Amino acid sequence: MKLLKHKNIVKNLATASIKGNNTAAENMNNTNTFCIESSHNSDRKS
């Protein structure tokens, strides 16, 4: 499930980049970083 969510974020980031919308790309990149950190944290807990 985590992987699927990650794939969608990457797809959205690519779409934003193609459109040349830097703000959207930056926002997606921040979200992507947060998701990666969250999954690392939950892995440590379990």
Image (tube, rainbow, N blue to C red):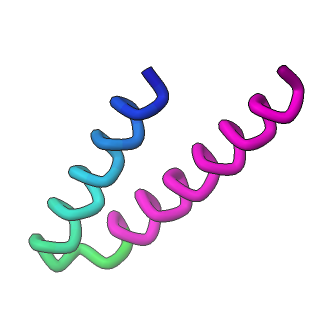
Q: Position of residue 13 (x, y in %)?
A: 29, 60
Along the horizontal axis of the image, is 45 left or right of 19? right
The residue nearer to you, when weighing 2 against 16, is 2
In what quadrant of the picture does the N terminus appear?
A: top left
Q: Quadrant of residue 43?
A: top right
Q: Position of residue 33 (x, y in %)?
A: 58, 58
Residue in the image at 31% along x and 54% along y:
10
Residue found at the very far left of the displayed protein? 19
Q: Which residues are magenta?
A: 24-46
- Total marks drawn? 0
Q: Quick check: is 31 in the magenta stretch?
A: yes
Q: Main secondary structure of the magenta part?
A: helix
Residue in the image at 48% along x and 29% along y:
2
Q: Quick check: is 40 in the magenta stretch?
A: yes
Q: Position of residue 20 (x, y in %)?
A: 17, 79
In what quadrant of the picture does the C terminus appear?
A: top right
